[in-house]
């Protein structure tokens, strides 16, 4: 059986790759205007905020491997739920592919919550 820590880390990597795939498809589909976010000129502060938000799944992937139980259990549950809420605020997205990938990310986040919630305490 795979350690829950490895499973959680892998799921966080899957969340990150899903969002990256959406960004790549958005570029190739032409569904963005360079230098703008939501119709306004992007500032360095906005880019920094986006970088911090998108870094979250990467940080969670690492923390899943190193943070002690039960702290990582609760961190995974809280952060996955916050990701779902954050992405629900943007629905519906313009592209069908975006909506599909957000739904896939919801499945990954649900799996993160489920694995963390059902994670038995160490013996």
Image (cartoon, grey):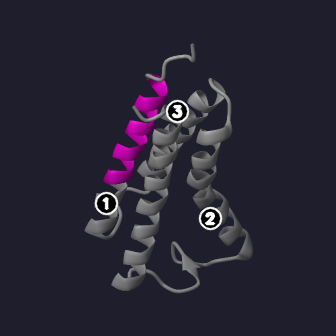
| Mark closer to the chain start, 2 or 1 | 2
Label 3 CA crowd tier, 10 Å (few <14, some 14–19, many 20+): some
Q: Which callout, 2 or 3, points to the residue nearer the camera?
A: 3
Mark 1 and mark 3 in contact? Answer it, CB < 8 Å: no
Tell me if residue 89 comes above or below residue 6 in the rendering: below
Between residue 45 and residue 40, name the one nearer to us: 45
Quadrant of the snapshot with the N terminus: top left
Disc number for residue 50: 2
Tell me if residue 81 comes above or below residue 36 in the rendering: above
x, y (%) of residue 102?
A: 36, 56
Tell me if residue 46 comes above or below residue 29 in the rendering: above
| Mark closer to the chain start, 1 or 3 | 3
Question: Quick check: 107 left or right of 4?
Answer: left
Which residue corresponds to mark 3? 77
Disc number for residue 99: 1
Q: Which callout, 1 or 3, points to the residue nearer the camera?
A: 3
x, y (%) of residue 2?
A: 43, 35
Tell me if residue 48 comes above or below residue 92 in the rendering: below
Between residue 67 and residue 89, name the one nearer to us: 67
Residue at (45, 62) in percent of width and height: 17
How far apart are the alpha carbons under marks 2 and 3?
22 Å
Label 1 CA crowd tier, 10 Å (few <14, some 14–19, many 20+): some
SS of the residue at dot 2? helix
Residue at (33, 69) in percent of width and height: 94
Magenta region's main secondary structure? Answer: helix
Magenta span has 112?
yes
Residues shaded magenta? 103-117
How far apart are the alpha carbons under marks 1 and 3?
23 Å
SS of the residue at dot 1? helix
């Amino acid at each position: 059986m795979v350690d829950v820590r490895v499973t959680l880390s892998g799921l966080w990597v899957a969340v990150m790759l899903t969002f990256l795939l959406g960004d790549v498809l958005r570029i190739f589909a032409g569904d963005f205007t360079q230098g703008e976010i939501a119709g306004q000129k992007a500032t360095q502060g906005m880019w920094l905020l986006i970088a911090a938000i998108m870094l979250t799944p990467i940080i969670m992937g690492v923390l899943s491997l190193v943070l002690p139980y039960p702290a990582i259990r609760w961190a995974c549950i809280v952060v996955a739920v916050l990701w779902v809420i954050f992405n629900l605020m943007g629905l519906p997205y313009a592209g069908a592919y975006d909506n599909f990938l957000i739904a896939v990310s919801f499945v990954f986040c649900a799996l993160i919550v489920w694995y963390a919630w059902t994670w038995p305490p160490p013996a």
